Amino acid sequence: MRKLVLAALFLTVAAFAQSVRGLIGGSTAPGAAVKATSLSTARERSTRAGADGRFLLLTIPPGDYSIEISAPGFQTMTRKVTLELNQELDLQAPLVPAGQRTEVEVRAVAPLLKTESASLSSVVTNQQITDLPLDGRNYYELALLLPGVTSAAQGSAGAVRGDFAVNVNGARDDSNGFSLDGAYNGDPKLNGVSVTPPVDAIREFEVAASTYDAGYARNAGGQVSVALKSGANAIHGTAYEFFRNGAMDARNFFAPAGVDPRYRRNQFGVSLGGPLKRDRTFFFADYEGRRALEGVARVTNVPTAAERVGDFSQSAAYAIDPYTQQPFPGNRIPASRLDPIGARIAALYPAPNRAARGANYASAPEGRDNSHNADARIDHALTRRDDLMARYSYGRRDLFEPFGGSTYSQVPGFGNTVPRDAHNAVAAETHVFSPALINEARFAFSRTAISVTQENQSNDLNSKVGLPRFASNARDTGLSFISVLGYSPLGDEYNNPQRSATNTWQLADQVTFTRGRALFKFGGAVRGLSQDAFRDVQSRGFINFIGFTGNPLAELLMGMPAYSGGARLDNPQRLRERSYNLFAQSSYRLSGNFTLTAGLRYEYNAVPGDKDPRFYAGYAADRNNFGPRIGFAWRPGSGGTVLRGGYGIYFDQPSLAVSEGMYFNYPAFDFRLFFAMPQFPLSLANPWPSNFPYPTPPSGFRFDPNLRTPYVQHFSLGVQRQLGRARVAELGYVGSKGTRLYGARDINQPAPSAAAYNPRPDPRFDDISRLESRANSNYHSLQASIRQQLSHGLTFLGAYTYSKSIDDASGFFTSAGDPNFPQDSYNLRAERARSGFDVRQRLAASGSWLMGRGFSLNGVLTLQSGRPFTVALPSEFDNSGTGRSSLGFGANDRPNAVASPSLSSPTPERWFNTAAFAMPARGTFGNAGRNIVTGPGLAALNLSVLKSLRLNESLTAQVRFEA
């Protein structure tokens, strides 16, 4: 018997299709015919092997196929395979001479080894998506199963309002790219996800984490590519409902005593696919709805009933008469001295409901999170050489937040309404000129619109309590932000209202062809962005009471603000941006077991601009964005070991929110600050006096005229080893270096000083925050994984990462534990530290066990060490002005570090050594670094039990429990 080996290798083609590359070993079957037939649509693609027995089938979509190989003098061989998104498949089977009676030995090697590419990428299969426990049913969270992936730090740009974001191999969380059926699916505002399809609509998704090829565009972090399901000749569909409520939940460990936040969620949906015309036209559509109510717990301090009327006889603080500097008799403010406006403001506080001093009020008002998601897709075989695809996806989310952030009001009544609409559409055409030459063209359009509106937009609370109205625009109605030191603030969040509507269109084309041992891809794209937006920062004004007399609440009751401020705005945003890119990628098999890949990508991003000439960025476009990519894959001998390595330069296109700084300069953004003075006291009747004799110098935002495009270098070296027929292990080094990353600093910062008056270098301005491409990062990791495909009823994926990430700014925007703004803008070296998202060790393990009788057990185990955070002072201490930015930067002074903050036996009540920090001398910077304290780690186990009930030949019911 003569055996020939068939190897079908499916290579990446620009993140929206696959190709099949094969080798027929030996020299007795040149010119063999190879045909791939879709089992769901009967669509065929065929080619013929060359004189050396090699063949290549290009741009085969994900799905189940029958591959048929025939050659004169040999029996026809047929093999069924499943192609995953961007999968590289190595299928081995013998060809037997015709008429030979020897029993055929068929050996199908699972597509586990990656023998043709250096790309570090992983596919999350449909079974993993649908079977693994997934609270909230957001497929993106399953990216955490992969090595090098961690969830973003709380409060980072992508992880707000319940959104999910990840850091991939040391890149920032807003550096990830997203595509849906090959179309851009990002939200350019913050570089997050735009449309989130329901789990039942997704066939699979891939995360390309490092050293991926030149076909990927726009971002330098991970690339998340999602393939939706499509129609077939057979009708198929699902209907489902998931529900969760408090009766099945344990009490929230973090909820304060006496408060039991409610939780109730329903998710329901349907999907249906099938033929419109058999073998030619197919449809798929789906819908999912979500209704969720969640109590949000807060503990804060509010005035007692006695304190609200000026009676501090039971309080520790004295009520001081500002005219005599002596306490009022009995520590009670006379009724004649109470300001009626201040009294009405104090009456807005709820009554205490706890006896705890300094934390006498707890609440858990319900937040709402409702959504609608839908997709509709048509696939049509126009001719034998032309395939058409069109898809439209829609997502709507209606969110009500009972509270803003931790620095805003912590009593109910001052929440936010957040509606969000997202649309994504794509039309694609694939034309087969020949089996060796294929063209793919697509046009995509997306729109993402989001608003954040204060709860009291239709309730003029300023007028009701007697405060003048600072805002001039009707949409800015509500209550001015009122801060009383020692108590919860009152008033609507000062960043709102805001709205942005961003349109993105993209036209792209790619040609794929083969020549001899080489596979070539080249193409390009043009993309346009337009964003119409407004953000009314400080539009209602603010009033602060800080306790000049020793009692901030008494100052409110007497109508004596310490300082106040606000902004007049005339800065509608009409941002426009255009980008162009070209790429070329090749894969060349130097020998039967060594493949070399090389690519080059060029990206040109025009400078964002506005239709109004008042707003401009003031820097020139970077025209030098050439990104080479190179990699290799070597399989020594004919065994199951592959050595892979790669290097590439990847440019990053920052979010549009970065460019919005151009709209916050005087006079379009006129911020004013008013300080109470003996000769010019402030009052609640006139907290923002127009005749204030000491006008505040304007703040500003500038772009560095030498601003350049950020980029990240990715590099990797690793080994894969197949263990048996269904298991593969991988071990490797993965690293990255970020250069010219965006960061801001105050270029008008004065030197620290203890003097009461500390002028800035340019006294005509207050702080001037300048955006610069100044930040850097380094990431090094050891990554190990083991994957088992279905064998003996078990599937398994384990991923371990040991890593360290260092930078001097972990993002452009402030996160919960890291301000990402330098303490001293002239000493950036002091900011170099562990990244805010640095997780030293992380283990993620997931698996499924088919137990028989329709039962299956599925689980996800996560173990990881803690993230670092920065210890900061509650207010500015160095007198350098970095804590007073009207744009929200700063408030980042750090203490002195006098000992190690680590404890040998930390507890939840005392996690780190608080005695390790001391106040610096007034007018000096603290010497403590960023992110020098490590928070608690994470240990989580999620399980699901599924029971499938086969009702008839085509209908199955499933009951599942998740915990």
Image (cartoon, grey):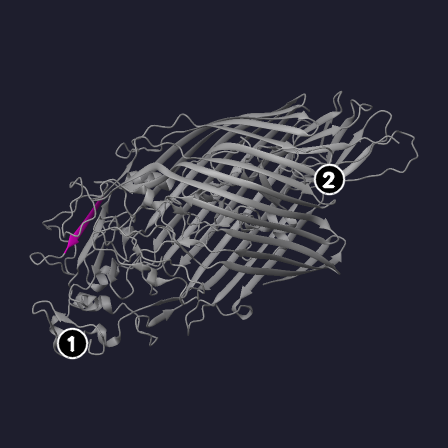
Please state which of residues 449 and 959 is positioned toward the viewer in this rendering. 959
Query: In the image, what residue occupies the spot 24% across and 64% down?
Result: 485
Please report the bounds of the magenta region as a residue range. Answer: 670-675
Residue 99 percent coordinates (x, y):
92, 30
Q: Secondary structure at mark 1?
A: loop
The mark found on residue 152 in the picture is none
Q: Is residue 70 magenta?
A: no
**Label 2: how many Cα within 10 Å (few below 14, some 14–19, many 20+):** some
Which tag, 2 or 1, sits closer to the chain's start?
2
Quadrant in which the N terminus is drawn:
top right
How far apart are the two marked residues, 2 and 1, measured between alpha carbons?
A: 84 Å
Residue 270 percent coordinates (x, y):
61, 52
Above or below, 241 relative to 888: below
**Label 1: how many Cα within 10 Å (few below 14, some 14–19, many 20+):** many
Which amino acid type is shown beneath numbered disc 2?
Val
Q: Secondary structure at mark 2?
A: strand
Query: In the image, what residue occupies the spot 66% across and 42% down?
Result: 231
Q: As drawn, which residue projects farthest toward the front?
A: 899
Q: How many marks?
A: 2
Is residue 169 visible in the rendered image? The answer is no
Above or below, 582 relative to 265: above
Residue 504 percent coordinates (x, y):
45, 36
Q: Is residue 339 left or right of residue 84?
A: left
Please state which of residues 486 and 171 is positioned toward the viewer in this rendering. 171
Quadrant in which the C terminus is drawn:
bottom right
The mark found on residue 332 in the picture is 1
Which quadrant holds residue 774? top left
Which quadrant holds residue 68? top right
- Residue position marked by numbered label 2 in the rendering: 81
